[in-house]
Image: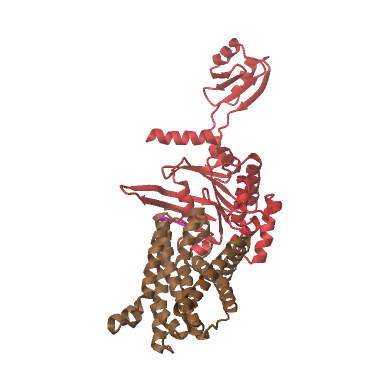
Amino acid sequence: MTSLLVAEWRRMIIDLVRYPLETMSMMVVMLAVFAGMFFGAHYLTAAPIGGTTLSGVVIGYAVWSLVMNATGFMGYSIQNETQNGTLEQVMLAPWRTVQIFLVRGVMDILEMLIPVLLVLVGLVALTGAQFNWRPMALLPVIMIIVTAWGIGLMMAALALLFKRMTQMQLMIQFALLFIIMAPITALHGVTGAALGVLAPLTVQVGVLHAAVGVTVPSVSAGMWWEAVADMALWFGVGYWLLTSADGLARRRGIVGHY
Amino acid sequence: MLMADGLVKRFQSRTNVITAVDGIAIAVAAGEVLAFLGPNGAGKTTTIKMVAGLVRPDQGRVTISNIDVTGRPALAAAHLGAVLEGSRNLYWRLTCLENLIYWGTLRRLTPRAARTRAVELLRLVGLEDRQHNTVQTLSRGMQQKLALCQALMHRPKLLLLDEPTLGLDFASSETIKTTVRDLARDGVAILLTTHQMDVAQQLSDRLAIIRSGKLVLSGTTTAILTQYSKPMWRITTASPLPTDRIAAVRALGWQVEQPSAEAILVTPREDDADGIYQLLDVLRPEPIRLVERHRADLAEVFQQVVEEGANAQ
């Protein structure tokens, strides 16, 4: 697995360095969005922004961006490789298809995390705002990303079978936005509990909010377990679906084309 | 090295089922070049992709170094390199060196070993001065040479070459052919598909021709060319042959065709090796420049095999 990680890491770094304008533009856009959110929130609430408020706004946006990338990148990568004609060559590598695209998904998140962290540091330095971050919040962030990778693997499975699925990807992202925004975790009774566990990302987002102090002050053990179960479910299903789609594409002879 | 037996692949279209490959069996030993030929749509690419594991056969089995390609694809892939036709095989935004290091590392080489191997291969195909150029700036011939290097990074035991010299200029084509010969000499098994019959004839040790998904001819290249050669002689003279000489040849019982004034194609009634001396006596003292026994080339063989099939259908 190390050589696969190294190969994709090197490719990512080359891409970042080879096209500095693209990298810089991404960071400028990100900085503009964060700054807009920060000053916008300040203007709307007419209250000093910092601590938990800043954490809520900024982490919310950063996590949302990470989720969008984690869900979309693997499918995009397959589409891109198909259009470029390199997908078959990639699938001739001595790795499972799911391993290759998962590693690419990991690299994409790293590629995004580096500028996000730089922009966050820049923003805090620029505004002098306090940033309320607890190391404990890292766990739900990781769980959110892993869950999103599960959905990303499902999108990759569809991309492997149907090749073009940009519109479908947008639809799924809107659905995700709804799921995350809807107060599913606040629902009571069996339905609420079931939806909380089954719907992707809601539990993890709830845990994150609690962990950074946006909502409840602490996270219960039950919430942690729910979050882990939900993550395992979505990631497992995604992994299984891409593995199955790989076999189906090879049986149908549509690996390199639709 | 490569054993493919009883391969069958059917594709379902909206209205019917198409059998693309129907019971193909091929084998390529270490150090051998097998030219796998057939007209468009015969099933060559599907077969190659089944060998590579990119298409799963409905029936039959492929093994590379005794490793089942369907059962253990990752392990089999470690012994396989491929230059696929119609596939770009490379990342255009990366340089030659970066591409080779990427593909080498992806195939389990360490970055250091990949770099060393990449430089070695770039030197082999004459691209060492282009190692820092991105692929998109290379000519078609250079890209194809680089694609070959990419396939060789991990020193595969089996190399699949789908149309490796298509669209290349003479020099690039010669480089590819020389590299293929050297690889075979080093023990690499090579499965080659091409529509360029001269390339197939020059490189192959054995031939397999398929038509409509079925294997219709296979054997060593030498034996097949001999089998399809006619017991015919071509005699070329420095000046046009007089009609009385041609009549005298016919009188010996030879069939005569005259493709040009200075050449005749003569066929004895029976394949009689000594008959040629009688014939030469009859032609004396005409200024003979060349006497050659007909030897079929692969283009003739291919055309004949494909036409036989078309007539049979």
Please check the rendered image and state whether residue B59 is part of the magenta-colored stretch, yes or no.
yes
Pinpoint residue B298: horizontal percent, then vertical percent. 54, 36
Q: Colour of chain B?
A: red
Front-lying residue, A232 or A254? A232
Q: Is residue A1 visible?
A: no
Position of residue A68 relative to residue B287, above or below, is below
Q: Is residue A229 visible?
A: yes
Magenta part of the chain:
B57-62
How would you classify the magenta stretch by its main secondary structure? strand
Quadrant of the rendered image containing residue B310: top left
Front-lying residue, B145 or B54? B145
Q: Is residue B130 left or right of residue B156?
A: right
Please check the rendered image and state whether residue A257 is part of the magenta-colored stretch, yes or no.
no
Front-lying residue, B109 or A10? A10
Q: Colour of chain A?
A: brown
Pinpoint residue A163: horizontal percent, then vertical percent. 43, 57
